[in-house]
């Protein structure tokens, strides 16, 4: 769905038509123009011919029904993955910003499949609309609204900055989808130019840094991008971001057995994270066939060291492991042959 195209079609229509159509797409969440019975039939026919609303997907739902992964086919035949995670009253969509990823992080399945292209803003928005329609049609769902959107899927959001921010503004629009800015989170490996741009946006979205190692030597082995964006550069950019926005910043840390989960790593991480408005989110690694996750007892000890040093720590809920929809696992088999 490309609303820019829709607006061009509506060019000769009465002025109220744009607002009416926006309501149908973003609030009523129609999936086909035939559902738009408030529109004239000739207009519905044109829209069906030129601006289809249907989103082609293959879906997998977890055993507990809390997680759903969608493999979405784009207009050019390329595919991306998105995930819906339901927990209590929260309905969180994890969206992709690129087809593949160019960064080659060793622990990430997406990073191992290579990079195809950036998504445009409407391809990002479609991922959210797909799950919003799904929730709306669930008879057992008391609250069918998406409550949170996280840019933690395939790709590096700040390497597709304009489209990511464009999608957020569309979904934040009070006359449309109307999701508050504080319900968006962007996760970056530390593209400092993007961090600086975000500070100037005056958007109260949440920033997360994929850190995953407490020193440059280890981080460069795990994440080659660290050779360009060192920990020192990232922390400097984050400090400036906090100074400008006064917003907390999350540092994500995937716990990988015998790689970055030692007591020494915890103590090094504590030295980095003992700063105002920093907090660490520990994530149990979801194996992609190369590495193993840290044992629960090891994660507990690691967390204790951080907390004893005065670091604010959270621990991510584990979603979608049995459907390979968890952190680092978003890479469909069909993508590898594209």
Image (spheres, rainbow, N blue to C red):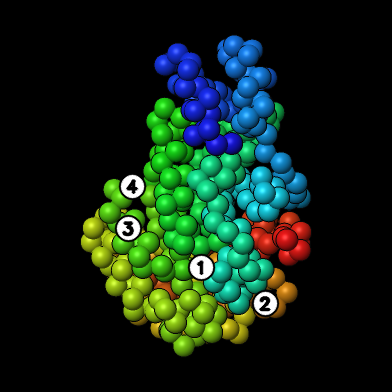
Name which residue lies at 35% across and 62% down.
195
Helix, strand or loop for disc 1:
strand
Q: CA distance from mark 1 to mark 2?
A: 15 Å
On-image quarter of the C terminus: bottom right
Q: CA distance from mark 4 to mark 2?
A: 37 Å
- Circle nearer the N terminus (3, 1): 3
Q: Is residue 38 above or below residue 210?
A: above
Q: Are discs 1 and 2 less than 8 Å apart at CB?
A: no
Q: CA distance from mark 4 to mark 1?
A: 26 Å
Give the mark toward the camera: 4 or 2. Answer: 4
Q: Are discs 3 and 1 less than 8 Å apart at CB?
A: no
Disc 4 packing (10 Å; few <14; some 14–19; many ≥20) = some
Helix, strand or loop for disc 4:
loop
Disc 2 packing (10 Å; few <14; some 14–19; many ≥20) = some
Q: CA distance from mark 3 to mark 4?
A: 11 Å
Q: Report the front residue among 202 and 257.
A: 202
Disc 3 packing (10 Å; few <14; some 14–19; many ≥20) = few
> What residue would you read off at disc 3?
197
Helix, strand or loop for disc 3:
helix
Image quadrant assignment for residue 325: bottom right
> What residue would you read off at disc 4?
203
- Point out residue 202 in the picture as x, y percentages from the top left corner: 29, 48
> What residue would you read off at disc 2?
292
């Amino acid at each position: 769905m490309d609303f820019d195209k829709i607006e061009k079609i509506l060019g000769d229509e009465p002025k109220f038509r744009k607002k009416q159509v926006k309501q149908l797409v973003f609030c009523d969440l129609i999936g086909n123009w035939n559902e738009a019975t408030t529109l004239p039939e000739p207009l519905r026919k044109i829209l069906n011919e030129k601006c289809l609303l249907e989103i082609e997907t293959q879906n997998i739902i977890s055993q507990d029904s809390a997680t759903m992964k969608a493999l979405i086919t784009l207009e050019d035949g390329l595919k991306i993955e998105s995930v819906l995670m339901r927990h209590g009253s929260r309905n969180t969509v994890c969206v992709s910003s690129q087809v593949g990823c160019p960064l080659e992080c060793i622990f990430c399945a997406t990073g191992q499949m290579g990079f195809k292209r950036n998504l445009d803003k409407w391809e990002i928005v479609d991922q959210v609309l797909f799950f919003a329609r799904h929730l709306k049609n669930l008879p057992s769902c008391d609250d069918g609204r998406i409550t949170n959107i996280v840019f933690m899927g395939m790709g590096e959001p700040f390497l597709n900055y304009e489209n990511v921010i464009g999608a957020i503004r569309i979904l934040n629009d009070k006359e449309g989808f109307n999701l508050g800015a504080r319900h968006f989170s962007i996760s970056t490996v530390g593209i400092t130019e993007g961090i600086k741009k975000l500070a100037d946006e005056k958007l109260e979205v949440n920033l997360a840094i994929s850190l995953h190692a407490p020193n440059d030597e280890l981080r460069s082995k795990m994440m080659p991008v660290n050779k360009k964006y060192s920990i020192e550069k990232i922390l400097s950019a984050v400090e400036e971001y906090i100074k400008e926005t006064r917003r907390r910043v999350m540092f994500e840390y995937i716990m990988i057995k015998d790689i970055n989960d030692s007591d020494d790593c915890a103590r090094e991480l504590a030295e980095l994270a003992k700063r105002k408005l920093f907090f660490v989110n520990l994530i149990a690694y979801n194996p992609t066939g190369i590495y193993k996750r840290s044992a629960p007892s090891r994660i507990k000890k690691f967390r204790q060291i951080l907390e004893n040093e005065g670091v604010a720590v959270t621990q991510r809920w584990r979603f979608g492991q049995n459907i390979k929809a968890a952190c680092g696992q978003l890479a469909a088999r069909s993508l590898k042959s594209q």
